[in-house]
């Protein structure tokens, strides 16, 4: 087993697109993810859920996930709205809210009279012209506009397709008001640091798992963590390849974790991983980049053995763009269903 795997003490999990796909009907769990959370908890690894969810209070969001069968509690979830409330209180900021109706209760104890900042979240149907223009007028009327954004995602996946996320609307207000938003939530370094502190694990001993190459993988890497991207949720190979980070890698789905026997294995003849349909590459692990790893050699635990077995050196950096693009499209059209 690779040295990095032996050192891992904790996992940070994104929720939407990793554990479940959201939707107007409440969403559906991604196959095998309920069991994978149980396996991680049983393994003794520390676990923290790190989400940019802003369409519900943390309590209601957790209640929904519990209803799907997930072993999760409010205390295990790091989310942007509570973090934003702490900032608002510390800086005596009074927000004008452009957020989802179901998130408003998170700000119940915050003074919202005579606003001196704007807080924007994934407001979904509340992203009307009138509401955006109202937020614009509040901001443009300030001597020093303060825009706080609960995330900066471009889009996310719901059961009926991709949806524009808060980042697109945040950018509109930034442009109109010539201001730079303060992002609370992923990929902000402070957000990851807060989650790590709550878990009690240093970044070098933690892995972030998410479906967003920028906000999950990139954010975690900038914080000193290794990161995996799952090929569920918003993952779109032909789009995400533009976000070429130092290393890129994938794991087919979150359910692949935890079972050596079910973990996919990479073979030299099958690489690049795009053809195999599964791989995972970690940031900064130059040793694993250049050499093939054996599987199941002196495993520390069955869970890490399964994760280790899903890893193969990243092929993406060595591929010519055209070949990468072709392979990417082939993968998208032929990828096997998550198992
Ligand atoms: Mg996600």
Image (cartoon, grey):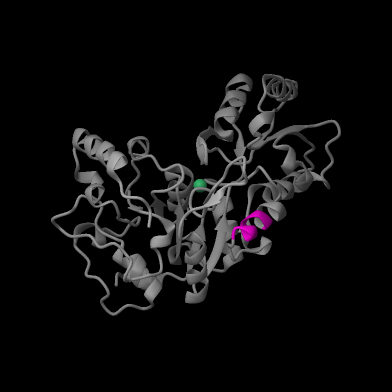
Above or below, 134 against 323 in this view is: above
Residue 64 within the segment the image draws in magenta: yes
224 left or right, relative to 335: right
Quarter placement of the C terminus: bottom left
Region of the chain picked out in magenta, as a range: 63-68
Decide if residue 17 is in sight here: yes
- Magenta stretch mostly in which secondary structure? helix
Work out whether residue 273 or residue 152 is closer to the camera in this orientation and state it.
Answer: 273
8 left or right, relative to 69: left
221 left or right, relative to 261: right
> Could you say where residue 63 lies in the image, as x and y percent from the top left?
68, 57
Name the residue at 85% across, 31% down: 114
Name the residue at 46% across, 60% down: 32
Above or below, 99 against 203 in this view is: above
Quarter placement of the N terminus: bottom left
Name the residue at 34% across, 57% down: 282
> Could you say where residue 72 lies in the image, as x and y percent from the top left?
61, 63
> Could you say where residue 137 lies in the image, as x and y percent from the top left?
73, 20
Among the 4 quarters of the image, the one containing residue 291: bottom left
Work out whether residue 161 or residue 223 is closer to the camera in this orientation and state it.
Answer: 161
Work out whether residue 311 or residue 336 is closer to the camera in this orientation and state it.
Answer: 336
> Could you say where residue 312 lies in the image, as x and y percent from the top left?
25, 59
């Amino acid at each position: 087993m690779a040295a990095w795997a032996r050192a891992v003490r904790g996992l940070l999990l994104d929720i939407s697109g990793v554990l479940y796909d959201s939707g107007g009907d409440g969403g559906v769990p991604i196959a095998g993810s309920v069991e994978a959370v149980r396996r991680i908890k049983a393994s003794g690894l520390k676990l923290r859920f790190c989400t940019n969810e802003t369409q519900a209070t943390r309590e209601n969001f957790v209640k929904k996930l519990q209803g799907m069968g997930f072993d999760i509690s409010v205390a295990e979830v790091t989310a942007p709205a509570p973090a934003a409330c702490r900032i608002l209180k510390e800086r005596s900021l009074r927000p004008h809210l452009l957020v989802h109706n179901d998130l408003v209760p998170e700000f119940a104890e915050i003074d919202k009279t005579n606003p001196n900042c704007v807080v924007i979240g994934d407001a979904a149907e509340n992203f009307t012209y009138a509401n955006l223009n109202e937020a614009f007028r509040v901001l443009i009327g300030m001597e020093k506009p303060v825009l706080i954004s609960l995330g900066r995602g471009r889009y996310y996946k719901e059961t009926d397709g991709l949806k524009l996320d808060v980042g697109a609307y945040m950018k509109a207000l930034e442009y109109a008001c010539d201001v730079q938003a303060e992002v609370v939530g992923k990929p902000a370094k402070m957000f990851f640091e807060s989650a790590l502190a709550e878990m009690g694990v240093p970044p070098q001993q933690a892995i972030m798992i998410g479906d967003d190459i920028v906000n999950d993988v990139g954010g975690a890497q900038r914080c000193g963590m290794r990161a995996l991207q799952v090929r569920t949720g918003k993952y779109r190979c032909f789009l995400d390849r533009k976000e070429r980070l130092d290393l890129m890698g994938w794991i087919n789905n979150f359910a692949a974790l935890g079972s050596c026997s079910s973990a996919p294995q990479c073979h030299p003849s099958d690489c690049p991983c795009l053809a195999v349909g599964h791989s995972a590459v970690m940031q900064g692990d130059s040793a694993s980049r250049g050499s093939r790893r054996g599987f199941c050699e002196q495993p520390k635990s069955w869970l890490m053995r399964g994760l280790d077995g899903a890893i193969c050196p990243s092929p993406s950096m060595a591929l010519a763009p055209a070949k990468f693009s072709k392979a990417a499209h082939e993968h998208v059209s032929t990828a096997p269903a998550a198992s």
